Amino acid sequence: MYLDNELYVANADGTKLSITGKMANRHGLIAGATGTGKTVTLQVLAETFCQAGVPCFMADMKGDLSGISKAGKLSGFIEKRKDGFGIPDPQFAPCPVRFFDVFEEQGEGIKTTISTMGPQLLSRLMGLNDTQSGVLAIAFKIAEDEGLELITVEDLSALLNYIGKNAKDYTTKYGNVTSASVGAIQRALLAIESEGAEHFFGQPAFDVNDFIRTKDGKGIMNVLAADKLMLKPKLYSTFLLWLLTELYQTLPEVGDQDLPKLIFFFDEAHMLFEDTSKQLSDKIEQIVRLIRSKGVGVYFITQSPTDIPDDILGQLGNRVQHALRAFTPKDQKAVRSAADTFRANPNFKTDEAIMNLETGEALVSFLDPKGAPSVVERAKILFPLSQIGAITPEERASFMAEYKKANNEKIAMNKGAAAVLAERTSMSDKAAADASAEKERLAAEKQAEKERIAAEKEAARQQKEAEKQAKAEAKEKEKSRKETMKTINTVTKALGLPSLLRSVIKSFIKK
Ligand SMILES: Nc1ncnc2c1ncn2[C@@H]1O[C@H](COP(=O)(O)OP(=O)(O)OP(=O)(O)O)[C@@H](O)[C@H]1O
Ligand SMILES: [Mg+2]
């Protein structure tokens, strides 16, 4: 509860325990066994920030956080504990809420593009080995160099196909792209698609700055429905990690402020560190360390502090430790490690207290204005002023209807790699078709020329033949004429005709 400019969240025997506003971006941890009050503590912290005008983002694992959108009421449990908090007349009120849902069933969608997510997070999501990750990184580089936008899973798949087909052209410039690796990535892509990743990759791409909004002086609570998402731990944790990375990359440096700009609650945080490469784990550590200068506080929620790597745990300054059970030696070790992270209080033994805490009770230590952790206190966590537990499906449906009414406009979409590559392929198909038509045309031309020359030759041959024939005929005619003349000469001579008459007869016959 934001009271007298204090972020008041717990009470230790009449002493109000508040988070120091200036130190709220030095991150936090809410830990404890199931049913000990972690979600309600998250809700109390979130609505306190909300009242102070600080927006929050939280993943709602079981749907019960949706109650933050409705005013709470006095329950028996709250009634019993209320007096200890020094709030005689609590004003139950809802927080302004925006519901999100990757699957777009229980809230607005949050989408990003494959390009924005980048090869490193995608490799983790797909569970690729080092060689395959290397090939994926090459694919991203090729897309960048060729101006191809990777928006959807389909875009990446089309790009991989294209690279696989043209591997020879790319290997010299970018490095070895084997068809085995391309095939393995394609299969991994299919697997995450069947897990529902295609809902998450697309347009319009979500702008994380949208989380940072207020309404009537209150910070907006951005609640992500994660009940379905958390069944795919890799998808869930990679998605949240992407959100954090985006916040880190897009928000400006703000330095230390009286209040943070955004609080990011990371529930089931242990999922983030399972199956995570050393490289990625280092990246998470770095983001957590640096994001506070952007005014963002990250609060991890998990069962035991031992779920979180030491170098990250060391950065979580504001701590609420609910009860831990210690049935096995391993549990007892976890209790001791949890106790060791606190500055001891001479009035009680930290490890014993951790095992004896009641529901809604916790060991609490917040950073003081100088950034030093306070001595641990055994405290009762405040009750929320919003509703404990989920809203009804009808109430959620009315939120959805309001959102849909306000978001009816059409959004311009960019063209992704799949479409561009399909065009490129169809263009090269067309070019191939054009080339083969030209070849046919040239062949036909050549054939026609051949035939023309053959015909010309034949005509010449026939003419020559005709001429030869004519010549032979003329020769024959002359020969027979000469023979006739010779005969006439002989006959007329023999008849003794005078030479004048013989000449007349000869010239007559000649004619
Ligand atoms: N601070 C509190 N004020 C009032 N009621 C509380 C408080 N903390 C816990 N409760 C009660 O205890 C119940 C269990 O708490 P909560 O759901 O927060 O546990 P949890 O640790 O999140 O459990 P799980 O691990 O199963 O999610 C709540 O439904 C609520 O009735
Ligand atoms: Mg819970």
Image: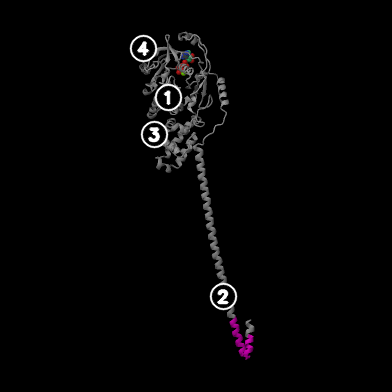
Q: Which secondary structure lies at badge 1?
A: loop
| 275 to 339, vertically: above or below | below
- The span shown in magenta is 481-505
Indicate which disc residue 472 carries. Answer: 2
Would you say residue 267 is visible in this rendering?
no
Place residue 166 in its image quadrant.
Answer: top left
> First in sequence: mark 2 or mark 4?
4
Asked whether 229 falls inside the magenta stretch, the response is no
Mark nearer the viewer, 4 or 3: 4
Residue in the foreground of this view, choosing between 343 and 213 = 213
* Residue type marked 2: Ala
Number of residues whose C-alpha sits closer than 10 Å to that of mark 2, classed few (under 14), some (14–19) or many (20 or more): few
Q: Which secondary structure lies at badge 4?
A: loop
Q: Where is residue 221 in the image (x, y as percent from the top left)?
A: 49, 21
Q: How much space separates mark 2 and mark 3, taking CA atoms?
A: 94 Å
The residue identified by callout 1 is: 254
> First in sequence: mark 2 or mark 3?
3
Indicate which disc residue 130 carries. Answer: 3
* Residue type marked 3: Asp
Q: Which secondary structure lies at badge 2?
A: helix
